[in-house]
Image (tube, coloured by chain):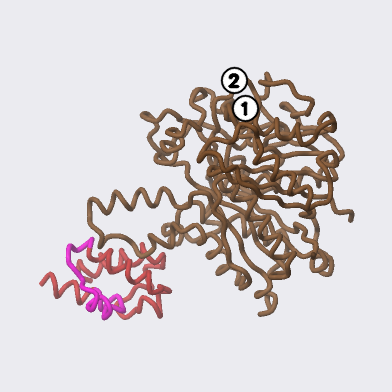
Amino acid sequence: MSNVAEQVKKIVVEHLGVEADKVVESASFIDDLGADSLDTVELVMAFEEAFGVEIPDDAAETIQSVGDAVKFIESKQG
Amino acid sequence: MRRVVITGIGMVSPLGNGAEVSWQRILEGKSGAGRIENFETEDLQTKIACQVPRGDGTDGTFNPDDYMAPKEQRKVDPFIVYAIAAADQAIEDADWKPETEEDKCRTGTLIGSGIGGLQGIADTALMMEQKGPRRVSPFFIPGRLINLASGYVSIKHGLKGPNHSVVTACSTGAHAIGDAARLVAFGDADVMVAGGAEGTVCRIGIAGFNACKALSTGYNDEPEKGSRPYDKDRDGFVMGEGAGIVVLEEYEHAKARGAKIYAEVVGYGLSGDAYHITAPASDGDGGYRCMEAALKRAGISLGDVDYVNAHGTSTPLGDEIELGAVERLAGEDAGSLTMSSTKSAIGHLLGAAGAVEAIFTALAIRDQIAPPTINLDNPSVETKIDLVPNKAKKMEINYALSNSFGFGGTNASLVLKKVEA
């Protein structure tokens, strides 16, 4: 797992209070990890803070899963 | 008008988690006051408070994880956590868990707070200064709003009846119970989960009340002596925190399901001082009129009341003004009246005070005992009223009255009555 993926996973575990083994790449924040719409807003903010990237609202809407977040952040950092 | 009774009680107080443990400790004359250890007090005039004893849940300690997942706690201020805990206890105690859609729609919530999410607002303002507005959490607003105590409780228990809240400073808890009782009496609901919650023991909270010259500042080295209503050496109130929640139920509804009944809410009175934003009117007229209104509603006079749970916050001005109002209203019956302030033990819970004290008043009726006013060593004035200094008093209690007065000149009185089994 990449550095970004590990850090994303850690943030998701912390914010959503879920078991680490459930936070797989394909896991959807809302459908699989019990987040609501406000939780996902807060998650995106946490990603911005942790990775020093800006995630515009239209991009944030496409980040639905752990994998989406990792991909987006890696593309910004790449 | 339909009759309204209390069928469940729940509490988080500086004397412990739960109404029964708090009540037992009150009767034993214990104090919930202590030195503030969880934030810097070096530059604050007041370094003491009555704080909820946190722990693993044993020996009366409060473990918030027992009521709310840690990830949820992070989103809200402490008053909401206290409200959820006390509501869980009250609903469990009443054994009223509505399952059908009709029962859910006939059960409502009315929980207030005096100040709400003060700490969260302060923290977020500082954070925004540093990191900018994009870092403000989506949970900032819903985690601070006063009516979200009612909101969270209604969501957790599926209560779809009236969803309401009260904000009247230190009268909040009494107004919440009084207003909720009226909703039941009028038929808007059959059951209401009602009360008050507060969690403002934080730097900005202490600093704010210090600026109003409301808090005790002379007992930093002996905190348990700081709250001393009616005593000549009192110098202000000691801030408390926690929540008191009751389940109010229409009498026939309670009887039909064989619920236990603590007391009946027979009187509720409200008034305004129209005098000053923080100081009580020196003639005590506001308190007098709200007691009068509550007694009129109950169809009795103060001479019929056995026990009064006073507002009695331990401020130099307020205690004697209330005492004077009670004396005038009681007239010749003052000599047979018993009145104590449980704030001597748990401090002033602000928006939760009236609810916590209504619960103590109901328990005084249940156990036929008046809780003590601790630290009352040298009364500042002579009175015929028994202020129950330092030791609980076994006595017959059929009617009891509880007073709450708040900043803004807002007053509320509740009259509770013993219900024969």
- Callout 2: SS: loop
Residue behind mark 2: B233
Does the magenta-highlighted stretch encompass residue A66?
yes
| Contact (Cβ within 8 Å) of mark 2 with mark 1 | yes
Question: In the image, which residues are magenta?
Answer: A49-69
Q: Colour of chain B?
A: brown
Does the magenta-highlighted stretch encompass residue B120?
no
- Cα gap from disc 2 to disc 1, whole angstroms: 8 Å
- Callout 1: SS: loop
Q: Chain of mark 2?
A: B
Q: x and y percent of residue B148 in the render?
A: 50, 62
Q: Could you say which quadrant of the image residue B376 lies in? A: top right
**Crowdedness near tag 2: few (<14), some (14–19) or many (≥20) residues, C-alpha within 10 Å:** many
Q: Which mark is residue B243?
A: none
Q: Colour of chain A?
A: red
The kind of residue tagged 1 is: Arg
